[in-house]
Image (cartoon, rainbow, N blue to C red):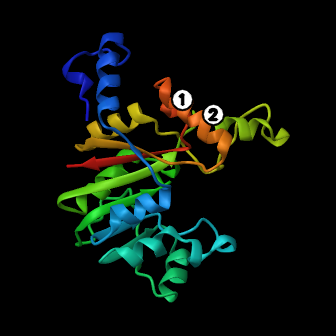
């Protein structure tokens, strides 16, 4: 985590911004495989709390495509967290271990985990700092938090939406999203919650030839943020 407050009182100071850029670049890591392969490797052989582990609505319940289900197969123990009791009842009936909890609350479940996963959750909540504090509370010593969230700056993300007339004149995402969380936002969330932002991952995003070429060009220009559809942030205590 880069604590800019130890350098300046101006959150727009350009010289401090150069140092921020250097810090973010130093923790950037490219993962050569796709998102699911990354997650399976990250959560293999550990205890996992998965916040927001279910799907949005009953119409899209698909256990065969559920990331939480895949994580359960490689983790030693996995607990799903959802705020919706109906979701919890559904997944518990399927044999999963789901708990109905507000993950931005001060609740302590009394369990500790090696990894906490928040897959595309942070952009939905009212209080992202409270979300990180909840996750932090449930970490074992030496544990880490993995948080994924969409990248609004990705060129393919923007172009695909611009081609659809229904998305003009404004770009639209999930109607429930409250915010985007870019790397400087993630760094500030870490600072306010007493965590360290330790890694920014970009996994491989596409097998399409044109997008592969575009990704290579953007990497060569030192503009990888434009090439990847999501951010994956890692936090530790």
User: Foreground residue, 93 or 222?
Assistant: 222
Label 2: few (<14), some (14–19) or many (≥20) C-alpha neighbours in 10 Å: some
Residue 135 seen by the camera: yes
State the image quarter where residue 184 is shown.
Answer: top left
In this picture, residue 41 sits left or right of residue 152? left
Say whether marks 1 and 2 touch (CB < 8 Å).
Answer: yes
Residue drawn at x 30%, y 41% is: 190
Q: Position of residue 160 (x, y in %)?
A: 73, 41
For the residues carrying marks 1 and 2, which lies nearer the camera in this image? 1
Residue drawn at x 22%, y 68% is: 112
* Helix, strand or loop for disc 2: helix
Instruction: First in sequence, mark 1 or 2: give its number.
Output: 2
**Mark 1, residue position:** 218
Residue drawn at x 41%, y 71% is: 71
Q: Position of residue 171 (x, y in %)?
A: 70, 36
Q: CA distance from mark 1 to mark 2?
A: 10 Å
Depicted 14 relative to depicted 39: above or below? above
Depicted 178 relative to depicted 88: above or below? above
Q: Position of residue 219 (x, y in %)?
A: 49, 31
**Mark 2, residue position:** 155
* Helix, strand or loop for disc 1: helix
């Amino acid at each position: 985590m880069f604590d800019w407050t130890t350098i300046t009182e101006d959150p727009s100071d350009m010289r401090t911004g150069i140092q921020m850029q250097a810090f973010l670049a130093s923790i950037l890591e490219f993962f050569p495989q796709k998102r699911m392969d990354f997650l399976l490797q990250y959560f293999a052989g550990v205890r996992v709390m998965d916040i927001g582990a279910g799907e949005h609505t009953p119409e899209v319940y698909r256990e065969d495509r559920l990331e939480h289900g895949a994580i359960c197969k490689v983790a030693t123990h996995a607990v799903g967290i959802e705020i919706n009791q109906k979701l919890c009842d559904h997944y518990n009936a399927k044999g999963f271990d789901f708990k109905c909890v507000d993950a931005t609350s001060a609740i302590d479940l009394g369990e500790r985990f090696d990894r906490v996963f928040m897959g595309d959750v942070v952009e939905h909540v009212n209080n992202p700092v409270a979300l990180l504090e909840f996750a932090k509370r449930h970490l074992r010593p030496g544990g880490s938090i993995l948080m994924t969230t969409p990248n609004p700056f990705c060129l393919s993300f923007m172009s695909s939406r611009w081609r659809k007339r229904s998305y003009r004149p404004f770009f639209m995402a999930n109607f429930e999203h409250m915010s985007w969380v870019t790397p400087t936002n993630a760094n500030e969330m870490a600072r306010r919650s007493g965590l360290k932002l330790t890694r920014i991952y970009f996994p491989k995003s596409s097998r399409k030839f044109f997008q592969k070429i575009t990704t290579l060009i953007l990497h060569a220009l030192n503009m990888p943020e434009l090439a990847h559809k999501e951010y994956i942030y890692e936090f530790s205590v």
